[in-house]
Image (cartoon, rainbow, N blue to C red):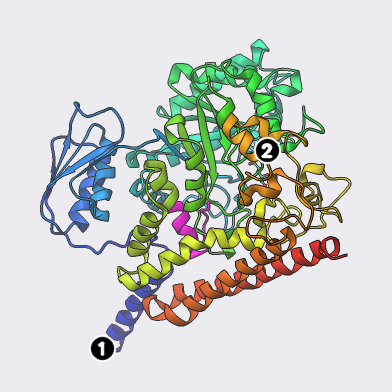
Amino acid sequence: MRQHLLSLFITFIALQAAAEDGHQLWLRYQPQNKAKVTCNQQSPTISIAQQELAAYYTGGDISLKLDATMSDDDGYRISGNTITARREAGLLYGAYALLRGEKNVESHPTFQLRLLNHWDNLDGSIERGYAGESIFWGENAFSPELIQEYARANASVGINGTVLNNVNASSKMLTRPYLLEVQRIAKILRPYGIKVYLSINFATPMALGETKTADPLNAAVGKWWKRKAKEIYKLIPDFGGFLVKANSEGQPGPGDFNRSHADGANMLADALKPFGGIIMWRCFVYGANHKGEDRVKQAVSEFKPLDGKFRDNVILQTKNGPLDFQPREPYSPVFDQIKETPNMVELQITQEYLGQSRHLVYLAPMWQEFFSFVPAKQLAGIAGVANIGLDRNWCGHHFSQANWYAFGRLAWNPALSSETIAKEWLRQTFTTDEQFVATVSQLMLESREACVNYMMPLGLHHIFKFDHHYGPEPDGFKADYPIEWCPVYYHKADKNGVGFDRSSKGTDAVSQYRQKLAQLYDNVSTCPEEYLLWFHHLPWNYRMKDGSTLWESLQYHYHLGVISVERQHNLWHTKLRHYVDEQRWHEVDERLEDQLQNAREWRDVCLGYFRQFAEP
Ligand code: GCU
């Protein structure tokens, strides 16, 4: 009897732990085993759709149908109890949509390429990762079960590709032992409709000692890449392609041999072309060729002259803003200037500059801001720098899971509102209680603006502490660092004022925008105040639209940011406890407390620093 009770108790504890540590993400369906699910064809992907519905669907029997007359994408139609799709993956997406509560809809993805980018290193560490080590690489990695759970979570929101390693790539990535690992991973992801891609180091053949140079126009180099492509596709026939960071932040690239980005990209594109692979070539390039030029202008300077010179299987991948994933940036003008080459946008899910996994910051509103300037239909794909690691709850902060979820949902349909996505996620992740959902979705929706306010309001940017990018360091300057890494370069505060003059009288970065916006941003009286100090250097007593001085307004925004977090913490602490299980409630509560402290630090350090100039 005692034994029995003990084992019951252990089972109970195990269930409790499983239910409360956040590991299940938004996938908390209760087993029903009620539905009979039939399909006119069979495949591993279709079996997954069948199993998921058979186990969890409560609304009756279901039939799945492949239909060659539907448009050729990953879309699905749910009509009564039938899911129809052109592709197998469409049936799987339809199954998850039905489980999420979608009924009688036809839905097609806006982006054909919906990718995660993992900045995972082969030693298991993750660049800008805040949720433990890599799920793919390193000593603790490669649990087939975990990778399957990862695949399922991605498929449930429609993500169909993943880059398995850091853009600062090791040349070892393309050696046989690692390619065999990639093959193992691909095998698990494949039935979930997810293709694998790799980041490559441009100098790989040379670094491995197999060629004398990495010059893209050298015949031996071209041959090496062709051979390598053949080897990869033999192991992974549906391999997606390469992501390349070249001649940026110390990475090798075609520029090392006086060749252009187009020379480099095209050489790789030719190697993958016979197998259907693509090259995603990053525009995050600054420094090397453009010493002295405003950093935010450099991508356009570098890539515009090459527009139209790329092979048709090259896509340029550009961050949403021209600098580097700041809490708020105007969109990158690359999207206005590159017209003859397909573009992809790179968003960052991991909150490198938005409080990392310590702050509750819901990113959908930021991404939607981007889409309000750059129409999604203009883009060939979307990539999100992942926030996933070996932490039990995957993302470090329970609410950071919402950013993974939101990325997937927006990659499918960027017209979905941030609110809809937040509510959808909350209902699946915590509880369907409407009071909770209404309160917490509101809190999530306000969180990004709060972060902008307590960190860098009114267009301020990059006043982060060196390297770790968490706390403030407005006086940051190191002579031995590139000036583009120094906060003082960005805010330019002195007794005369603050802000970076990118108007036509300054660096003229405004001129890279389409004409209407170029004029709007150039003129200080029409420039939206949220971008004011991004585009203008202004005196401390400059009059804002509400009549306050710039200095007063700056103080107001910093205080407002802190007050928002105070309110959020207070709500969570006093009103929301009974809706949420103990463990997750505590973990979120603790982080909100940290966030509040950090927000106060941001306000005090930044205002303290600016005060010496504003109130001398
Ligand atoms: C940022 C980030 C780096 C990263 C780089 C990139 O600068 O801090 O860690 O490598 O972006 O996107 O390439």
Residue visible at 27% across and 61% down in the picture: 29
Label 2 Cα neighbours within 10 Å, binned few <14 / some 14-19 / many ≥20: many
The answer to whether 1 appears left or right of 15 in the picture is left
Residue visible at 39% across and 60% down in the picture: 25
Extreme residue in the bottom direction: 2
Which residue carries the number 2 mark?
A: 522
Q: Which mark is residue 1?
A: 1
The amino acid marked with disc number 2 is Asp
Residue 184, x across and y down, in percent: 44, 40
The answer to whether 444 appears left or right of 553 in the picture is left
Residue 136, x across and y down, in percent: 51, 47
Residue visible at 60% across and 18% down in the picture: 224
Q: Is residue 403 magenta?
A: yes
Label 2, ligand 1: CB separation under 8 Å: no
Q: Which mark is residue 269?
A: none
Residue 92, x across and y down, in percent: 27, 43
Ligand 1 positioned in quadrant: top right
Label 1 Cα neighbours within 10 Å, binned few <14 / some 14-19 / many ≥20: few
The amino acid marked with disc number 1 is Met
105 is higher (above) or lower (below) than 508: below
**Rendered-image quadrant of the N terminus:** bottom left
Q: Is residue 506 magenta?
A: no
Residue 205, x across and y down, in percent: 66, 24
Extreme residue in the front direction: 547
Distance, label 1 to label 2, CA atoms, is 80 Å
Counting the numbered discs, the total is 2
579 is higher (above) or lower (below) than 213: below
The answer to whether any part of residue 326 appears in the image is: no
**1 and 2 marks in contact (CB < 8 Å):** no
Magenta stretch? 387-405
170 is higher (above) or lower (below) than 596: above
Residue visible at 73% across and 23% down in the picture: 255
